[in-house]
Amino acid sequence: MRGPHGPLRTGPSARRRPLLPVPRPTGDPVASQPSPGPSVTVFRDVRPFGGPAVDLVAVDGVLVDSMPDGAVAEVVDGGGRMALPTLVDAHIHPDKTAWGESWRSRKAARGIADYVAGDVELARALPTPVGERAYRLMAHAAAQGTRAMRAHADVAPAFGLAGLEGIAGARERLRGIVDVELVAFPQHGVLRIPGVVELLEEAAASGLITHVGGIDPAGFDATGGPGAVDGDQLDIVFALAERHGLGIDLHLHDRGERGLVPLRDIAARARALGLGGKVSVAHAFAVAQLSGKELDETADLLADAGVALTTVALSEVTVLPFRRLAERGVRVGLGSDGVRDNWSPFGNADMLHRAWLAGWALDARLDEELTACFDLAAHGGAELLGLERADLRPGAPADFMLVDGECVPQAVVDVPRRELVVRAGRVVARDGALV
């Protein structure tokens, strides 16, 4: 048999064995004291992408093609399991989550303003501090094979910087396990209510964030109520990012021209200010509605400006045509969005399941279509975050997971248990839990 990445190992040698480190020989000095040499781990009998069984050798967190001379290695038996790259969540809101809390019923909502009001109610009702809830969710994501994420935290007078500080604390607790970029996100709008601009300034100066956000400048944040701030949202956000050397990550939910006009403006600003590679737009539902020449022209505009997109596979009509966008040079990542929050009772921060959702939304049937959904979760987000590609080749980061299965398309469909997760050559999770 052959899979899309090579022959599949079958027969007795492919039987799964317990995932256990191979004990060091008695008297090995490395077992009782730190080694003065490189850190070496051999992952024995694993099948990259479902291909033939090999040994993966990690030296100081990087895969190499052979053992260094004289090195003493820790050995982990992979039991013939399939090795897959770990994944990148390009868009998640850990501060909003009720993951692990008692069930909370949600109210009907007619638009973003209702959802925003519900966010405040939920945050006040939950007994667990935001930092602990964020850590709980982020640790779960890491145990399911997420190696990096871009996390958004609401910044508004109702919260202050509590969400940012909570996620930043969780990021420190997970250092070395999952890399975290942090966005100060004005979910309540930049202009709609007073105080947000000042909080964004404070967040930018805090050293906690990597990006500043924005939301629907032609729709939700175009007008406000009493006390609304005068100005242009994009002027404020771009000036803030420039002043503090930050990236920009904006939410665009608006469809049709109300979504496309700001998108073109964002691309023009990014190009004029030399911010290519530092600007991304989440959701971009207006792009999901495009096809043919109009899609290609929009993709070319974004690629030329270096503006990336993220999609969260919410539905058939909102998932971005990521393969066509990538062909035109647009970086596209995949994200979880909200996880069991006021906006939705769904979500699990499992990026392999999110690849499944992307395939389901696109009615994927062919192996190449299912593999493209996996690649979006593994490599699309990595490119968007500026990370090295974890493709299991020599020289790549030793970031991978071991699962049961024959090939990548099957893994997307089955969403198998992550039996072992490796980060920088170190086992960080087994059977879905951090070690």
Image: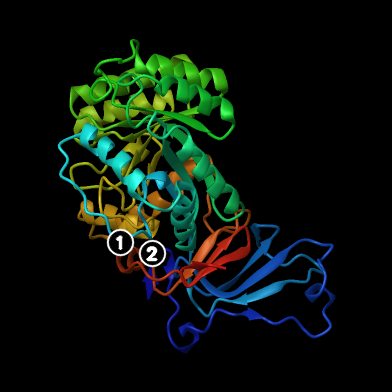
Say whether residue 411 is left or right of residue 389: left
Disc 1 crowd rating (10 Å Cα; few below 14, some 14-19, many 20+) is some
Front residue of 298 and 285: 285
Q: Residues within 10 Å of mark 2 (few under 14, many from 20)?
A: many
Residue that carries the numbered disc 2 in the rendered image: 408
Rendered location of residue 378, percent (x, y): 44, 52
Answer left or right for 33 relative to 96: right
Image quadrant occupied by the C terminus: bottom right
Residue at far top of view:
230
Label 1 secondary element: helix
The answer to whether residue 388 of the structure is visible from this angle is: no
Question: Of circles 1 and 2, which is in front?
Answer: 2
Residue in the picture at 46% in, 57% down: 136
Residue 168 showing in the rendered view: yes
> Which amino acid type is shown beneath numbered disc 1?
Asp
- Quadrant holding the N terminus: bottom left
SS label for mark 2: helix
Q: Where is residue 169 drawn, in percent x and y?
A: 56, 46
Relative horizontal placement of residue 71, taking residue 209 as reference (left or right): right
Q: For the residues labelled 1 and 2, say whether their Cβ atoms are less than 8 Å apart.
A: yes
**Residue under the point 84% across and 76% down:** 29
In the rendered structure, find residue 367 and report the number of the disc placed on it. 1
